[in-house]
Structures are given as C-alpha cells and as structure tokens.
Image (cartoon, helix red, strand yellow):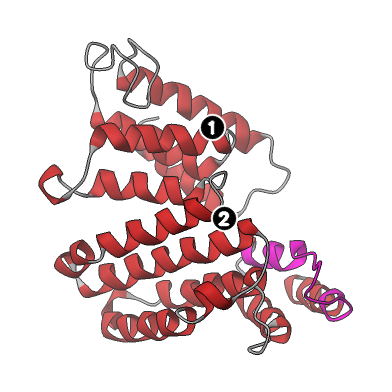
Amino acid sequence: MKYALACLSLLILASTTAFGQDFSALDALHDSRAFEPELAGLEKLYSPADPQAAVVFRLVRVRQQFIADLPSTMNKEKVARFGELLDFMKPLLEKARGNARDRATLYYWNAVVIGEKGAAKGAVEMLLGTGDIRNNCDKSIAIDPGYGDPYYLKALLDLALPGIAGGSLSRMGQLYEKALQLDPVNIWYLTDAAISIKHRNWDAKANKEGKNGVPAGTADRDFAQVLARRAAAAYAALAAPSLELKGKMDAMHAAGL
C-alpha cells in the first residue's frame, strides 16, 4: 500500500511545476519515512540552473536523514557524506530562489547538517561547530523572524553546552518561549521544552521575574507539566501522527512527563 501511495504521489508531482508547487505529497512521504520515493520526486524537481529553495531544503532534509540513519559504526562515512552535503548547499544558500520561509529553512537545515557532522566526529568537533550553527540560525531568523525552528535549535544548543562554552539555561528558556509563541502547537517544541525545563529544575524564586522562559513565579517542574499537557493535546488532535512525533511523545513520557 505504501509503495502504491508513493507512486501516486510521484504521478501527481510530475503533473505540476516547481513554481507554486504543492509539496504536501512529498512532505507526507517524508513523515511516513518513505524516503526513497521522496528523494526521487525531489530530484525530478531540482534544477541546478534555477534552484528553488523549497526544493533544495527538502533535498537536504531527506539526504540528511539517509546519513543520520547510518549506524554509529559508520561514523567516518557519515562525516564524509555530511561534508558532501554541506558542499552541495554552500553555493545554494544565497543562490536558491523562493519566499522568505523557504530560504530561511535552507539556512536552518545547513545549521542542522553542521551539527550532525560535528556530532559524528565527536564532542570536540561538535563544540567547535557551535558558532557556525548559531550563525546559520541567526541568518535564518534575519530572513524570516517568524520561523520557529532556528530559535528551537538554538535552545537545544544552549541546553547542551556548559556556560563556559557559551551555553545559557536562561536563554534556553527564552528561546523555547519564542519558538512556542510562533508555533504554539508544535510537538517538537513542546516536548523538548518540557524535557529541557524539567531538567533545568529551577524553583519559583529563581523565576520570580518571568525572564527564563516560564511565567513569573512558576517553578520549572510545574511549567514542564503544563507544556507536557499542551503537547498531549496537540498530539491527540492529529489525525495521523508521524512516527517521529510518536517518538517525541514517548521521549517526553520517559522523562516522567
């Protein structure tokens, strides 16, 4: 059945042009992890002479997924392939045409791939790449300040890094708050914010001014529960949640939320 749906999706894609393209069929393939037909459809749409940001960032997204899914025993190959993907993106960051959201999304995925490459190389390389990750997130935000993903990625970075390396747990909360202001029912934001804020575990006194991404006078553990309930409500409202979203919910429950 999945193969038949994939073929139907590709037939629909073949009947349209890149301009004004409805990418819902390709995005549905991605959500169902039908990556091979998704990649085939995107390669039909990609034009090196006239690269469209909406096509390019989706190409990057699916190629990144293929590499990320390789086992950790193949880290050397992962590093090489992530490097090739960054080389593919480099001339397209400024060249690819499209609306602000699509161009901002391309910079976001560049930041993601930089982080993935660093993680595959090891902790030191990951640390050395944080400046480039933040820089690409900031470029994404400059293009489209209303796009939540780069704020979310920067929040994850602030959680992962110790203060001496540039991390900030206060700024982490602020960045999650900004991302959720822009997309209040985003399950990725809600689940990771709930887990991160519970992990921070500041008391109500530490949050008395409401400047750490939680309401004034609220303890982190209490607000994490609020976020978890919001995530559960958003997930329940989905007709067909993806495997990735199920995984996010499972991770949140495993964290005791």
Asked which secondary structure carries label 2, the reply is helix
Disc nearer the start of the sequence (2/1): 1
Q: Position of residue 238 (x, y in %)?
A: 69, 41
Residue 200 counted in the magenta span: no
Does the magenta portion include 24? yes
Q: Residue at x 14, y 43 (%)?
A: 163
Classify mark 1: helix, strand or loop: helix
The residue that disc 1 covers is 181
Part of the protein shown in magenta: 12-30
Q: Nearer the viewer, residue 154 or 38?
A: 154
Q: Position of residue 231 (x, y in %)?
A: 53, 33
Q: For the residue carrying disc 1, how many other residues have a C-alpha within 10 Å: few (<14), some (14-19), or many (20+)?
A: few
Can residue 185 be seen by looking at this rendering? yes
Q: Return the x and y of residue 59 as percentages of the image width and height.
A: 58, 76
Query: What label does residue 234 carry, if any?
Result: none
Residue that appears at 23% across and 16% down: 203
- How far apart are the alpha carbons under marks 2 and 1? 25 Å
Quadrant in which residue 183 is drawn: top right
